[in-house]
Image (tube, helix red, strand yellow):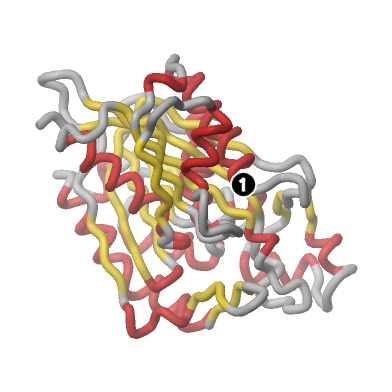
Amino acid sequence: MNGSRIAAVGHYQPAKVLTNEDLAGLVDTSDEWITSRVGIRTRHIAGPDEPVDELAAHAAAKALAAAGLTPSDIDLVLVATSTAVDRSPNMAARVSARLGIPSPAAMDVNVVCAGFTHALATADHAVRAGAATRALVIGADKMSDVADWTDRTTCVLVGDGAGAAVVEACPAGEEPGIGPVLWGSVPEMGNAVRIEGTPSRFAQEGQSVYRWATTQLPPIARKACERAGLAPEDLAGVVLHQANLRIIEPLALKIGAVNAVVARDVVESGNTSAASIPLAFSKLVERGEISTGDPVLLFGFGGNLSYAGQVVRCP
């Protein structure tokens, strides 16, 4: 059983940008109020004719192109999302149809903000076990569809987008490029972040999530590094779920990744749920802020009060 690696990444965001000043015209808020509390300045919003599977397919097509592969090279498609409107066909099947992938195993993974790191681990396990050769792992969410645009504490947070990674087996003798996952949840606190009701709406207990993330998650993230055989100071990059700058910065500090580039895409993209980690990771790669082979911690957390993290090597 060889390990697996990320061969390439890609991302996509809708063209429409919603600024804090725009939001001040919708609810009782201001640029100063938003930036001082969550650090967000802009977010991208998909239109009514841009469904989740379209966002996902754009990001996946870019990852495929970057890997030099065609749709027929893929035999597993995993889409992490919590904003699918329909129960069936799932997003993975719809993305596969858009891209022309001939006969993949196609599954959705709903672990909300930790969805991408759960899906990445699942793809790693499938490749290691020989159940898949190459996988497309996508995080895509259209949070604007589930936002309560009358609630200034939550509507200022959300954005839409997608990020994707191509996962493949490592050549014989090569060290694994995806480290062991450390995952879990706090089910008794699962209601602290929720998308529920008819129509479905996003809501959260912000202070509870902040305390949990900044106090309980640092030792878990450090243990994920330990499982990869690295100390936090060995990391070249840290990509946390882009929930809130006031969570990202203290959490990165407490992890101890003193030499790492810390992704802060939340400032320009908002909270894109399952898309946030691959979106931010792809941007770091695209801008050359991390280099091929660099160790990067990916760590998702949030909805269900679930978490999952692993150290990966930059493609």
Locate the C terminus by quadrant: top left
Q: Measuring 45% from the left and 17% from the top, which residue is drawn there?
A: 70
In the rendered image of this protein, does residue 129 appear above or below residue 276?
above
Q: Measuring 36% from the left and 68% from the top, which residue is drawn there?
A: 306
Q: Measuring 86% from the left and 70% from the top, which residue is drawn there?
A: 26
Q: Measuring 46% from the left and 22% from the top, which residue is drawn there?
A: 71
- From the viewer's perspective, tell me whether residue 12 is left or right of residue 280: right
In the rendered image of this protein, does residue 308 appear above or below residue 170?
below
The image shows residue 310 at horizontal and vertical percentages of 28, 48
The image shows residue 67 at horizontal and vertical percentages of 43, 20
The image shows residue 133 at horizontal and vertical percentages of 26, 27
The image shows residue 13 at horizontal and vertical percentages of 66, 41
Q: Residue furthest top?
A: 68
In the rendered image of this protein, does residue 13 appear above or below residue 304?
above
- From the viewer's perspective, tell me whether residue 210 is left or right of residue 294: right
Q: Give the camera-side residue of 82 and 155.
A: 82
Q: Give the camera-side residue of 3 and 197.
A: 197
Q: Residues within 10 Å of mark 1 (few under 14, many from 20)?
A: many
Q: Amino acid at mark 1?
A: Gly
- From the viewer's perspective, tell me whether residue 214 is left or right of residue 204: left
The residue identified by callout 1 is: 161
- From the viewer's perspective, tell me whether residue 6 is left or right of residue 203: left
In terms of image quadrants, where is residue 179?
A: top left
Picture mark count: 1
In terms of image quadrants, where is residue 20?
A: bottom right
- Secondary structure of the residue carrying tag 1 is strand
Locate the N terminus by quadrant: top left
In the rendered image of this protein, does residue 179 appear above or below residue 38?
above
